[in-house]
Amino acid sequence: MDADKPLCGRDPQSTYVELAVEIFSMLADATRVRIVLALRDGELSVNSLAEEVDKSSAAVSQHLAKLRLARIVSTRQEGTRVFYRLANEHASRLVSDAIFQAEHALTSSPAHHQAQTPLAVG
C-alpha cells in the first residue's frame, strides 16, 4: 500500500491545503500585498511601511498584526520602535508569482520574461 510513502505537502490530499487557502485569503488584500513587496529587501518600521504603501500608520499596523498572526511577518524591537520583516522567503515568492501571473493575464509578452528584465523573486 502507501503506508511507507510520505505525504508531500503539495499532494492534493495534503493536510496543508486548508492552511494554504488561509494564506491566500490573508494575502487577498492589496495593502497586504504591497507590504510584502515593500519588505522584500529587509525590515522596515510601521511608519516607513506606511509611507511606502501610501496608507496611514494605523491602517498598516492593523494589516501587520494580521500578517504577524499568519506568521508571514515577524518583528524585532529596538527601544520603542518595532521593525517588521518577512518571516521567510516564501511569502515574497508567492506574491511575486501572483504579480507575474497578473502580467500574463494582461499581456502576451510579460516583463518578467523579457531578457533585459532580471527575475527578482526574493
Image: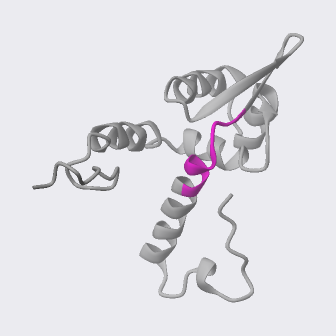
Q: Residue 91 colored magenta?
A: yes
Quarter occupied by the C terminus: bottom right
Name the residue furthest top.
80
The correct choice, above or below, for 25 with respect to 93 in the image is above
Quarter occupied by the N terminus: bottom left
The correct choice, above or below, for 64 with respect to 91 in the image is above
| Magenta-colored span | 85-93
Q: Residue drawn at (27%, 55%), measured in percent from left and top?
A: 11
The correct choice, above or below, for 92 with respect to 114 in the image is above
| Residue 50 at x, y percent in the picture | 74, 33
Q: Residue drawn at (78%, 23%), measured in percent from left and top?
A: 76
| Residue 73 at x, y percent in the picture | 62, 33
Is residue 104 rendered to the left or right of residue 68? left
Is residue 42 rendered to the left or right of residue 68? right
Quarter location, residue 78: top right
| Residue 68 at x, y percent in the picture | 57, 26
Q: Residue 92 colored magenta?
A: yes
Quarter location, residue 86: top right
Camera-nearest residue between 88 and 59: 88
| Residue 75 at x, y percent in the picture | 71, 24
Q: Residue drawn at (56%, 39%), measured in percent from left and top?
A: 32
Name the residue furthest left.
1
Is residue 33 rendered to the left or right of residue 20? right
